[in-house]
Amino acid sequence: MRLDVRHRLKPPSSPANLLAHHAWKLGLGVVVAVLLTARGAGPVYTHPHGFPTSVVATSVPCGDIKLDQGSADTATWTAQSSPYGTGSPYILPHNDPNLPTTDPNNPNCLTITNAPDEVHVPAGIKLVIDGSQGPVQIFSHGTGIYVNGGQLKTVSTDSTNTVVFEAEPDVASWDGINVSAANSANRGNASLSFVSIQHALTAITITSGATSSPDNASYGLTVRNSGIGPSYFNGIDATNTPILVSGRVDPLTLRPDGQFGTLNNIGSRGIKVMYEQGLPNYPSVIPDKALDVENMTFGSSVPFGETTCVPLQPCAAGSIGNDAILGNFVTGQPAIKLDNNSFFRAGNYGLELTNANNPTITNNIFNCNGSGSPKPVISCVGTELHYPAIYLSGVTNLKFGAAGINNNSGQQNGLDAIGLNGQVVSDLTWQTPTNDANAPSLLHPPHALGYVIANGDLQLVNSKLTVKGGDVVKVKGGAILITNGSLDASDSSLKTFTSLRDNTVGLQACPSVLVQSCPSPLPANEWIGISLVGSTGNIVNANILFPTKAIDISGGQASLSGPDGAAYGLVVSNSRLGPTFSDSVAVNATPVYIGTSKFCRIDTIPSDAAYLQCAGAGPGDHGINASYTGTPRPAAGGGLKLLGNDFQGSTNEAILGTALGGRLVDIENNTVETAVSPVAAPATWQMRRPIPRFTSTASARQTSAVRSATTPARATAWTRSPSMDRPPTSSPSTGRPSAPAAVPSVTSSMATWRSTATSRSPPTTTRRSSVGRSRCTTARSRPPARR
């Protein structure tokens, strides 16, 4: 057989030709999968290696490999020698059920059931591929190398003395390298360095659960300075096995060099890692990281030995059908590390991780991933579904900074963003995402990837979330949940918390893979809202749009200084909240200051004349629902201060207070419009301005008024305030406070009274006059308001 046909002299078959001629190997379902993941990449750029004319090709037979003479456990393949008597190139046989098995010149590996068989490295056996005598080349007519409880390793390889695995020209693909466990005592492992694996169905598959290999005592598979692809399905597919994949760094740029350490032209996923306790060989202990990928290039490559194509240039461009990296982990597993990698032209996410624990994702660049382009090698502009560059779902113990998420940048992605949900255990300064459609250049370098919250809560534990002026925080479905921490949104410039489907501000994320329907106008209940548990919140000049509840706070200690100098657990000023599906602000056992804020549907179109003004009803239940029944209760005197707020269209009371005994309640200059009942509070309060009195005008706006929720009647003892001419009197029939005999005008000096009882006044209903400034107040009994 001539040596010049032992290497590929032409571009590989297209995916369509592969499917047409080798469907027996792929199966119908897989055929469909390949068709769906083919992304229209151009011809794959390959480079053949020459062979010394004095070397005779070695035909490797079916079954277990032959061992070195005198060795009981090792087979060594070099450029010049092997147990078979000859050296490189090594030719692996056919395994095609459609071919005969009787041709001695073309061996065909089939099992007794006529199924494809492979070349085997059995339990306890080592296959060593040694580059000390020159490059080693291994070509296959279809069979793979199956390491079943054995070991595969390369030694003495470098950028000149490489190892190449490739399909023969007469076949579209081969079965790749497969590493499995023979039993619990013999878990297959592999260590590969300066290796190129081309035209396999999947280049490397490992399911052994091994936690060590010759190159590293903590990983069952290590792949260093190697090139993987073209590959018709996945580049590396690892199940229940920790792996390490690393590339070579350019000493000038300190970035991956794009030649030694690549995964490119992959039909589905570059690296797929899955841990599942219900699958075989789940490791009881993972010595180091569950996944470690460093200095790799995805979606661009130059074949080993190539001199005419410069790495990372258009001639090296390729693509990855779906995710560049997909990882599914078990909650609480050891950390993962992804550092200094370059991701190009993945069809879906550049990086997608589920249940990753304490990940380090640093210094990575993402360009043209998830762009929706059917031909990303040609253009990063597309109309298909857009994906964020990174998606982290169910993450735990996530940190931001050098030991966590840090310095990840990119451009021309579907969304130049990190989508995430899960648990954060460090302070987080919000990074607002923006999209950059420009190709990388000196004028347009990659920019920082911002954040969006998608498909779950973002929970900060013992940490502070800082949202700066100009920031836009977008959420799909879940909540911003801060436990024993704080929210600092006190910058005086405008900031926005809103739905990921809100295209009026910030990143245009709808439609995308995260949110696919884009109604207008948006309803309330798009996301849960801001939830503060044992935490504080300082919010200034913020829009909080379309949540279930804008703010839900409980147990916040009085550690913030309000505009009046007093101490509070929640301070909200000059902000706009709504529309909300439930209460706009729900308070439990927290001293609160809310001032000059609007509770309504907000106009968020900057070009509108009514920008940031009320455009409709806001609260779906109460505007503010404050309860002090929980524990720990704030110290006596710490309570509820509401100044100059505007409530529009609450379904129930605009302001409802419960268990305010011993609390200081100060409600001034608020306006309530079209609420079912404006204000409700128990009788233990301090209230500024006349209490059961509404002022009706032609514009149908009402100034501060209180309706007391009904409770069993008790004796009321009023204490006289120095500013009052006389206190209110009690009704002989009910024992409840009645209106004062003389009530100052709403334009007169402020009047104050305080009740020390726990009873509540009968409800007060306001009837609006159609003209003038007439005042009309009617008291009647009715059941307590719906909560």
Image (tube, helix red, strand yellow):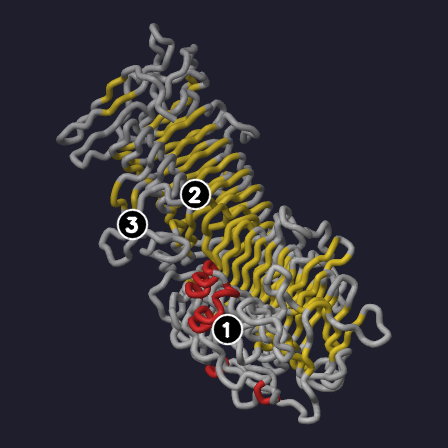
At 69% from the left edge and 52% from the top edge, which residue is drawn? 281
Say which element carries label 2: strand
Q: Kindly identify the amino acid type of the residue bearing the numbered disc 2.
A: Gly
Q: Earlier in the sequence, mark 1 or mark 3?
A: 1
In the image as oriented, which residue stretches furthest toward the right?
A: 70
Q: Position of residue 272 (x, y in %)?
A: 57, 61
* Residue 405 visible in the displayed image: yes
The foreground one among 476 and 556 is 476
Say which element carries label 3: loop
Which one is in front in this view, the residue at disc 3 or the one at disc 2? 3
At 46% from the left edge and 60% from the top edge, which residue is drawn? 28
Residue to which mark 3 is pinned: 519
Residue to which mark 1 is pinned: 265
**Relative to 718, does residue 345 appear above or below in the rendering?**
below
The foreground one among 121 and 577 is 121
- Report whether 89 appears left or right of 234: right
Residue to which mark 2 is pinned: 529
- Report whether 32 appears left or right of 165: left
Say which element carries label 1: loop
Q: Kindly identify the amino acid type of the residue bearing the numbered disc 3.
A: Pro
How many other residues sit within 10 Å of disc 3, few (<14), some (14-19) or many (≥20)? few
At 46% from the left edge and 52% from the top edge, which residue is drawn? 453
In the image as oriented, which residue stretches furthest toward the bottom?
A: 53
How many other residues sit within 10 Å of disc 2, few (<14), some (14-19) or many (≥20)? many
Q: Earlier in the sequence, mark 3 or mark 2?
A: 3
